Amino acid sequence: MDWSAITVTLKLGGVTTVLLMLVATPLAWWLARDRRWWATCAESIIALPLVLPPTVLGFYLLVLLGPQGLVGQFWEGMGGPRLVFSFWGLVIGSMLFSLPFVVQPIQQAFRIIDERYLEVAATLRARPIDRFFTVALPLARRGLVSAATLGFAHTLGEFGVVLMIGGSIPGRTKVISIAIYDAVESSNYPLAHQMSALMLVASFLLLFTVYWMNRRPTRQP
Amino acid sequence: MSTIRLTPPSTPSDPSDPTDLSEPAVAPNCAVHIKHRQGSFLLDARFSTPGRGVTALFGPSGAGKTSLLRCVAGLTQPAAGFVAVNGAVWLDTAHHVCLPAHQRGAGYVFQEASLFPHLSVHQNVRYGQRRAKDREHGLSLEQAVEWLALGPLLPRMPAGLSGGERQRVAIARALLASPKILLLDEPLSALDEASRQEIFPYLTRLHQELRIPVFYVTHLVKEVARLADYIVFLRDGQVTHAGPAHEMLRDIVAQDAGEDTPFCLIEATVIAHDAQYHLSQADSAFGVITLPALAQAAGSRVWVQVFAREVSIGLRIEHDMSILNQWPCRVVSAAESRPGQMLLRLGPAAGEVGVHLLAQITRKSWDLLRLGVGTQVFARVKSVSLVE
């Protein structure tokens, strides 16, 4: 078993999910409530990773984040460490790649909240930000849990983007999916079997959790 | 939209006048003027009400009552308008004043209690209270729990409550936020009859004890008769009449409620109960009214509803007949309401002016009895019911 790959994978999944939730929740709130054309435009951009080959996303990231790239040059000029072929480069790539899987369940959960609850909160002297935290978030909690689980599961299973911008540095950027690929390349089938079975079981359990939660009767009247 | 100009409903003196250090000469009041277009519907309502007590916003459905209430609460922003509650100006589009809902302090109870489903009853009622710290006229949690009998409900979740219980919680929640006005949007309409009967005593109690004004939206006469101190009649987005309930209820209700069958309401005081015959007697401007046994104690004020078709006319009193209520009246006015049907407005033969009874008779009877305006008659009322 390649334990360093498992550690890197779990760390990448955890960090990506936490950061994604912080970014995706306000984004989903905005998309759920804004019906103007630029919100639709943003929605489409966020959904792009669903249809684009991961290599396309990975290629653009490589170009942008690389030392000669627009973002990379600026970042390194500010004294930042190199992004490509580093763990944080992987985090950025995974966040973009998993964004639609996290935004969409949250957005859907916000969309079905009865506007009436927010109005009641307003007449009870709650400011908009207060209403968001004390009414909208708790009422969307199921969507939030779904989103976090899907985001985590999707990050674990990522291959293309990681391959393009992560390289395969053991202990730093070599994740399970890459380790499996390497094992097959070097004809180490027993290792490939072990890691693949692990991924299969872990992914199944995560998806089962999401579907099981969505099936339970809702407490909202 | 910016061309709509509004002037606030007249207030006899400027309450903000810094030289006026005495008690305000004007009784505190609520002034509302809303102009708002929703699709093809135009709301243009202007009225002012006393600064305390229950004002019924009364009218048929589609009259704009709910839209008006939402504009007062700040949940809908009207194209133009003015809203002031006991001196606090919440909306004045002419001076670009528009306070957001959370800064107004308008307690709002919706048709269907929208209790937060993720919070317990206790957390629900504390929601507004926690955000209204250091406000005046703060009602204590204990008081609210006692008034609305919430004790056993506090630990429960809203999903497990009956409709009537939810509305009681919603009222307590609104009151605990120390509102400057309480807005009730047909709070009984989503309830069944049993729940309505259950919740009515609580509303009556609030009516007696609250020091803040209450706007109560309804299309039901009986709710108006039992709760309102002041009535604003709305029809097609406009105010048709407004005034103190005891004046308005006497005769305007019948025509403005959009009722098919005209009726009138008579104010009466319970004087005695007759246990043997299961009857009660009440004193009114027309004389003593005999009606089915009442639960109210002697001395209580009640409103009695009399349908015009239940009233027949005689020229002298009859003793050998089954009808118990025969009152001496005079014909005040009469009009042919439908072909062959006359609708008569009767006043008491002696005494009070401005109190009316409606009677519906055929034109043939009108001619046979040689009736005319001023004729002294006896109104025989077959059945009388209490408004409750």
Image (cartoon, grey):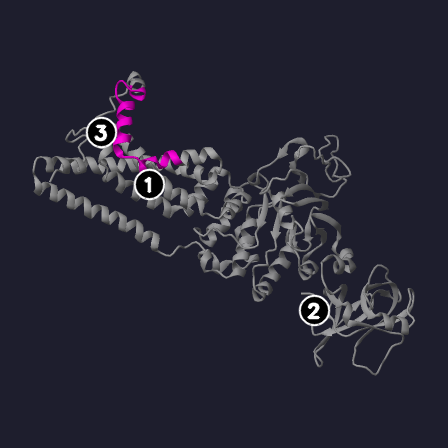
Per the image, the residue denoted by label 2 is B297
Nearer the observer, B111 or A124: B111
Q: Chain letter of disc 1? A: A
Amino acid type of the residue tagged 2 in the rendering = Ala
Amino acid type of the residue tagged 3 in the rendering = Met
Q: Badge 1: how crowded within 10 Å, few (<14), some, or many (20+)?
A: many
The local secondary structure at tag 2 comes to loop
Picture coordinates of residue B380, whole percent (x, y): 82, 74
Residue B356 within the segment the image draws in magenta: no
The local secondary structure at tag 1 comes to helix
Q: Badge 3: how crowded within 10 Å, few (<14), some, or many (20+)?
A: many
From this viewpoint, is residue B211 visible?
Answer: no
Per the image, the residue denoted by label 1 is A101
Residue A51 within the segment the image draws in magenta: yes
Q: Residue at x 70, y 51 (%)?
A: B234
| Residue depth check, mark 1 versus mark 2: number of the one nearer the observer | 1
From this viewpoint, is residue B230 visible?
Answer: yes
Magenta segment, which residues?
Answer: A44-72
- Distance of mark 1 from mark 2, alpha carbons? 68 Å
Per the image, the residue denoted by label 3 is A164
Nearer the observer, B36 or B15: B36
Q: Chain letter of disc 2? A: B
Q: Quadrant of the C terminus of chain A?
A: bottom left
